[in-house]
Amino acid sequence: MTLQLDLDSPLMQPDFSFGIATAAFQIEGANTADGRCESIWDKFCQLEGKVLNGDDGSMACDHYHLWREDIDLIESLGVDSYRLSIAWPRIINDIDGSVNASGLAFYDNIINQLNARNIKVFVTLYHWDLPQYLEDHGGWLNRDTVHAFVHYAEIISQHFQQRIYSYCTFNEPWCSAYLGYQYGVHAPGHKSRKMGLQAAHHLLLAHGLAVPVIRRHCGGAQVGIVLNFTPGDSASDSQEDLRATQIYNDYNSHWFIQPLMQGSYPSSIVQLYAEDQPVIEASDLADINVSIDFLGVNFYTRAVVATPASNADELFQLVPQADAEHTDIGWEIHPAALYKLLTELNRMYNLPPIYITENGAACDDHIVDGQIDDQQRCRYLQQHLLAVEQAVQEGVVIKGYFAWSLMDNFEWAEGYSKRFGIVYVDYKSQKRTLKKSAHSYRNLLNSRVFIKN
Ligand code: IFM
């Protein structure tokens, strides 16, 4: 299977941007170099049983030292854009808010190189690596963290201005809040719904307060946020399953997008989880509802949802789809859900332009005779590109697509066991080898040249 789109596809036009994405903690390593302070993920990795095989981010892809080669690699793929995150612990390494010049210098090098090569720079300010000194004071449960983030966002936007094409405040606040504070599977590992909802509120508020500050300094660059969606489909047409699915979607999707777009939280969740509601100050929802230039959508899979057994403490349950195809991380492959998600969000909300900021597959890749024939990933990417194309044809404004990820990397609680890269990483030698999907992505992108000229 090769990646292919018709030459007259809206995705093949010059105004549609193709890119590739990474995140700091997942690739950089060097987690004590040049004044970087500890993050919640450094600490979490040290706790027994939290990360598969006891893996950690101390080496990762050693991108901190191999960034020049990695930029060559990115350029060789022919992408228009590169989405990376900046590690807050490299920049503000002390609770007093002081700035670490070496941290800025590291990203200066990368961003200047990308600018010199005409690769648009999409930066995420927060991709989960909270400085541990803030977690020691309550992390995202403490409203002071909101202000610490705004300070950090100001430092970055003042420094980089329009050298960054697109500023994203947060990547997937659902993960930071729910996986980190409600389900305990991500750093910092708390387990309480009330904490999850409070953390979510503070993350959204930090976004809302940071946007005008970034705008003041960024010289007209785009400012937005990235949300992850695993949309729920009802297991049946029964009233009970439909209701459970609505609650699931309100809790997981609309709890995040509704305040951003409409300045309110879903009333179902406010009522159903009344005791767990966050502390919200009078102007918070108006602040969260700030206008943004783009919405990033990360999509991997869907969920099938049913009403739970009567004694369960959740109001919905997920129904495994044993007969469907899954990726190596156990996620169902269901590209139709991406099309449905995009068209539904477009109907429900007055959206800014969308970027698909992450989409990809974890596969059990192996090098055979120097090659990695990742057929499942190629199929996955092709099917999802067609879903995006279909949504655009139906009038959803989508300006770009980023494959996740440039190269295999630290997959959070799964450690290095899951490979999402289109480039294979041998972690012992740090050798990078293009997988078939990378060759195919490059061919697709290069085939656009005929249109552009
Ligand atoms: O690796 C992650 C990434 O950090 C955030 N989005 C989902 C990816 C796959 O789990």
Image (cartoon, rainbow, N blue to C red):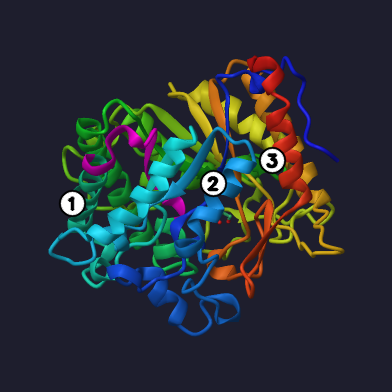
> Which-is-in-front pick, marks 1 and 3?
1
- Quadrant that contains the N terminus: top right
The residue located at (35%, 74%) in the rendering is 32
Q: Nearer the viewer, residue 103 or 319?
A: 103
State the image coordinates of residue 297 (x, y, percent, origin top left): 52, 38
Q: Nearer the viewer, residue 1 or 203?
A: 1
Of mark 2 and mark 3, the one earlier in the sequence is: 2
> Which-is-in-front pick, marks 2 and 1?
2
Q: Ligand 1 is found in which quarter of the picture? A: bottom right
Q: Are marks 1 and 3 in contact (CB under 8 Å)?
A: no
Give the extent of the magenta segment. 158-175
Q: Which residue is mark 3?
A: 238
| Secondary element at tag 2 | strand
**Amino acid at circle 2:** Ala
Q: Which mark is residue 21?
A: 2
Mark 2–mark 1 Cα distance, whole angstroms, equals 27 Å
Where residue 441 sits, quadrant-wise, is top right
Q: Are marks 2 and 3 in contact (CB under 8 Å)?
A: no
State the image coordinates of residue 196 (x, y, percent, origin top left): 38, 59
Of mark 1 and mark 3, the one earlier in the sequence is: 1
**Amino acid at circle 1:** His
Q: Are marks 2 and 1 in contact (CB under 8 Å)?
A: no
Q: Residue furthest left?
A: 96
State the image coordinates of residue 44 (x, y, percent, origin top left): 42, 75
Q: Assess mark 1: CB under 8 A from ligand 1?
A: no
The correct choice, above or below, for 157 with respect to 36 in the image is above
Q: Assess mark 3: CB under 8 A from ligand 1?
A: no
Q: Which residue is mark 1?
A: 147
State the image coordinates of residue 166 (x, y, percent, origin top left): 39, 34
Mark 1–mark 3 Cα distance, whole angstroms, equals 46 Å
Where residue 381 sits, quadrant-wise, is top right
**Amino acid at circle 3:** Ser
